[in-house]
Image (cartoon, rainbow, N blue to C red):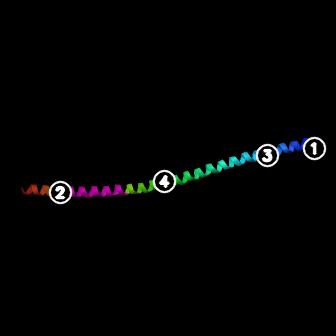
Amino acid sequence: LRCDAKSQSGVIDELKQKITELTVDLQNHIIVKRRLEISMMNLENDCKIIDAERIRLTNDVKDTKLSKQDLEKLLQQANVQIAEQGNFI
């Protein structure tokens, strides 16, 4: 009986140690999971910022193209006026 009791006591101690190790592992995994979730939230926020910047830049490019077209029209009109004035001289 003493052998059985010692044996069972040893098994119980091993199981307690295993539970402690598993608890530590679980806590570490929970910490890693939280860090990953925070990283994902940060990445999602960065993506939103990048997307907003992309939209802003796309609109800026459109505005620049329109301004360029307007300036080209004005330049063309100015060249026509200069040519017409040259004809009268």
Q: Which residue is mark 2?
A: 78
Q: Residue at x 71, y 49 (%)?
A: 23
Q: Main secondary structure of the magenta part?
A: helix
Q: Nearer the viewer, mark 1 or mark 4?
A: 1
- Tell me which numbered mark, 2 or 3, is placed earlier along the sequence: 3
The answer to whether mark 4 and mark 3 are in CB contact below 8 A is no
- Residue 28: numbered disc: none
Do residues under tags 1 and 3 come within 8 Å of each other at their CB atoms?
no
Q: Quadrant of residue 2?
A: top right
Q: Is residue 6 left or right of residue 73?
A: right
**Mark 1 vs 4: CB contact within 8 A:** no
Residue 47, image x, y percentages = 48, 53
Which one is nearer the viewer's eye here, 23 or 56? Answer: 23
Is residue 88 magenta-colored? no
Q: Indicate the secondary structure of the residue bearing disc 3.
A: helix
Whole-angstrom CA distance, mark 2 to mark 3, is 92 Å
Label pair 2/3, CB-CB below 8 angstroms: no
Q: Which residue is mark 4?
A: 47
Q: Which amino acid lies under the numbered mark 3 shown in the image of this protein?
A: Leu
- On the image, numbered disc 3 is attached to which residue? 15
Closer mark to the observer between disc 2 and disc 3:
3
* Structural distance between the alpha carbons of marks 1 and 3: 21 Å
Residue picked out by circle 1 = 1
Specify which label sits upstream in the sequence, 4 or 3: 3
The reply to whether dot 2 and dot 1 touch (C-beta < 8 Å) is no
Give the CA separation, mark 1 to mark 4: 67 Å
Q: Secondary structure at mark 4?
A: helix
* Residue type of the residue flagged with mark 4: Cys
**Local crowd size for mark 1, using a 10 Å CA cut-off: few (<14), some (14–19), many (≥20):** few
Specify the farthest residue to the right. Answer: 1
Label 4 to label 3, Cα distance in Å? 47 Å
Q: Which residues are magenta?
A: 59-77
